[in-house]
Amino acid sequence: MNPAQLLVISAVCARWRSIAFLTATLWSTIRWMYTPQKHPSTDLLRLWISQSRAAPLHVQISVMGETASEVDVVASLLRPHWSRCRSIDLMFTHENAAAFFLPLPSHLPLLRDLNFTVEATSAPTLTPPSVPNSDHLVSPPLRLLDSSTARCRPATIRIHMPSSRELQLPSFSDLRDLKSLRLSVNAPRAQMLSITAQAPNLRSLDLMIYQQDEVELCVLPDMHPCLELQRLAGAGSRLLIPAPHLRSLTLVDEASIQAVDELLSSRYSTPSLFPRLQNLALIFGGASDNLSADRFLNLARFIREQDALGSLHIVAGRLPLAFLLDKSLHNPINPLVSQPCSKRKEIPLPCAKLNLLKLDMVMIPNPFTLASILDTLLTDRPRLRIELIARLGVDDPECLLNLRSAYPERVALTIR
């Protein structure tokens, strides 16, 4: 309950005011938000902590700016009470402020939700001259907890730290209740994937993996039985694990192509790895512009295998989009088309349930070829809608404009 609500309750009458001050759970939600323009009083925070008594706490701290004396005071006030926190939500625009709160205690018996975000890091420090090969700037890793093992049973973990600073993640003693995991940290790939393997009931997974250390497949599960949403990004995100109930998959950067390559060439080479996948998003960085068209063949094959796919979203620079769409969604010419009608065999459309195709491109190479492919897709799929964005314009937009004119209710075109 926020201060305004408590003031309203307290103003009703003396009895309600007495009830408000004596009910510890009404004071169990602690919010403190600091900005360079707004410096909230720490006295109110002291009152809230005192009135909450032994009730489980829900703590939300937000600090904009590098450092301030009030931040140190807040961290000191909260330090004795972390063990009774049910949720911890810490957001900092700079790591200098975060350092006042770290490390958190490893024994958090009531913790269900952990959210720790740092948006920017400090300038790296110079390594001591005695350290071999120390001719470059490095920053020591930050410790999230004061021990290597977290004694808690969380349902949600969300941790974000810029890649310029390594963060020491703990191992978790019990992840049976973990439903949502989001890690965007510079930590060993094996450790991040090991955390996912310990969470059999995981439903939402979002990983940004920077490091590319090797991972033994034997430590990973054969599948995520409950996973419904998965997002993988970073150079180390090269491993997809089958999930029979997965509904949404987002692959970011060129690692998405590598993940699909490894998937199709590994022990999981059978089709229907994601039999319920409905939404697929592919987000490519600038390096994909230099890849040859053949490099996308496995990705096209992967798309074709998603029988339940209803939405495909592609964000890219200048990749060979027409080639990818042709290989993934367009049917090849039926080799039996010249035979009598009674003997012809109809080839089912790949991704027959697809009803939305979103294409967000920086530039569109070969717009005429793309328009031809899109026209074929619209003809073959009466329910398909297309949203096309070209952020830096198109050399010859007339063919795409004609496509929009031919399908005014099914094609949305934005050329900037």
Image (spheres, grey):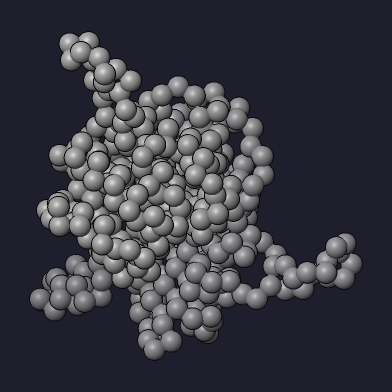
Q: Nearer the viewer, residue 205 or 60?
A: 205
- Report whether 315 appears left or right of 380: right
Measured from the top left, where is residue 5 in percent x and y?
19, 72
Measured from the top left, where is residue 281 in percent x and y?
37, 48
Quadrant in the rendering for residue 91? bottom left
Q: Nearer the viewer, residue 150 or 360?
A: 360
Q: Nearer the viewer, residue 327 or 64?
A: 327
Q: Residue at x 50, y 25 (%)?
A: 268
Quadrant in the rendering for residue 345? top left
Q: Quadrant of the N terminus?
A: bottom left
Q: Residue at x 35, y 79 (%)?
A: 44
Q: Residue at x 39, y 89 (%)?
A: 37
Measured from the top left, where is residue 204 in percent x and y?
38, 44
Q: Say whether residue 114 is visible.
A: no
Q: Residue at x 25, y 41 (%)?
A: 377
Q: Quadrant of the C terminus?
A: bottom left
Q: Say whether residue 4 is visible.
A: yes
- Report whether 160 appears left or right of 35: right
Q: Nearer the viewer, residue 134 or 11?
A: 134
User: Which residue sits furthest top?
Assistant: 343
Measured from the top left, where is residue 406 in percent x and y?
14, 52
